[in-house]
Amino acid sequence: MAEHDTIEEQIRSMNFGPAPDDLLARITTVVPHLAQEKRPANAGFSQVLQRFAAEWSYGLSLKIAALAIVAVMGVAMGHGGGHENGIGGLLFGDIGVEDII
Amino acid sequence: MQPQTASIKDEDLMTRVAAGDRMAFDILAKRHINRIYGIARAMVKGQAQAEDVAQEVFTRLWIYAPRWETGKAAFTTWLYRIVVNCCHDHLRKTKVDRTASEIPEDLPGDGPNGEALLAERQKNEKVRAALDTLPERQKLAVTLCYFQGLTNPEAAEVMEMHVKALEGLLVRARKSLRSLLEDERARYG
């Protein structure tokens, strides 16, 4: 543990000093102009795309995939079973719950 | 920093930067430049390169300010992610163009503190040279946790990884650094 402390301490004690004054001056004067040139021209559409990409999450993909599977299975069972009995029949109204129970 | 600006929260300043307020940008730059420059100095070789990285960070901050949303992530986490991405881009670029990282730095002058400055710089460079041998992610984890003093969960959030994975990186980094620095101590005393 003492050895770990030594290494951590050596890194913590690194001192590069503060940023040079001219760097701050350069950043505050140049950056807004530079950034204006780099900013995308069609900000509206790109922002919509960026927002969609940012909000698209793994959890949402799973929910959509699960819904799609249920829908496909429901349709397949309904048609495959000729709507007469089982879950397909129940889904398409050929039979009631009491027929299954 | 003036007392009236010190009380303004980063989040409020960002909202103003998003609307193109240059004064808010100046306050943010003044407030965070040393921290950003420190990370850049630890991550990339040379003062000039670190300055370029810091400038790029603030350019991206200005460009992406409208995208930043209060409450999604802490401002500092978002800012650190930009720093990480800029360092990563710079390191990738300098892998192709090796000459950029080989520009020597100015040596300290012969002033009254010249010797002390030189000794400190040599010490920094020894640790930095050891850091440079680490894989990029280990180096980043060490820089954020030990040099910048972020907690493990904070650093893990910046690096978009699980805390356990970050701890693994730190363990491996410490092991490599210990053997490197001890080898050097044994060699040169």
Image (cartoon, rainbow, N blue to C red):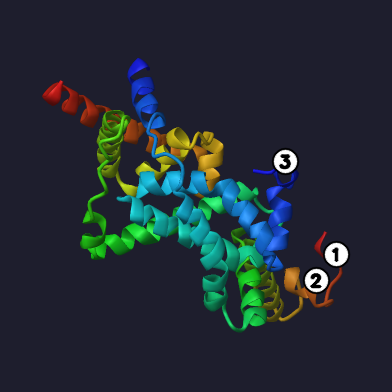
Looking at the rendering, in which quadrant would you find the C terminus of chain A?
bottom right
Q: Are marks 3 and 2 in contact (CB under 8 Å)?
A: no
Three-letter code for the amino acid on which mark 3 is drawn? Pro
Residue B5, given in percent of the width and then of the height, sits at 72, 47
CB within 8 Å, label 1 to label 2: yes
In the picture shown, does residue A73 fall above or below B23?
below
Name the secondary structure under disc 2: helix
Residue that carries the numbered disc 3 in the rendered image: B3
As drawn, which residue projects farthest toward the left?
Answer: B187
Per the image, the residue denoted by label 2 is A90
Above-or-below relation of B3 to A75? above
How many residues crowd around disc 3 within 10 Å: few (fewer than 14), some, or many (20 or more)?
few
Relative to B168, say whether A3 is above or below.
Answer: above
Label 1 and label 2: CA atoms lie apart by 7 Å
Q: Residue at x 37, y 31 (%)?
A: A11
Q: Position of residue B123 (x, y in %)?
A: 28, 31
Q: Determine which of the numbered discs, if any, sits on residue B47 in the image.
A: none
Question: Helix or strand or loop: what does disc 3 sit on?
Answer: helix
Mark 2 Cα-neighbour bin, 10 Å: few <14, some 14–19, many ≥20? some
Residue under the point 59% across and 60% down: A58
Label 1 sits on residue: A97
Q: SS class of the residue under badge 1?
A: helix
Q: Using the image, name the chain to which the residue with label 1 belongs.
A: A
- Closer to the eye: label 3 or 2: 3
Q: Does any portion of residue A52 appear in the rendered image?
A: yes
Of residues A84 and B178, the one drawn nearer to the viewer in this rendering: B178
Apparent side of residue A100 relative to residue A9 in the rendered image (left or right): right
Query: Rounded to the nearest whole Å, what is the CA distance between mark 1 and mark 3?
Result: 73 Å
* Residue at 27% from the left image edge and 40% from the top image edge: B109
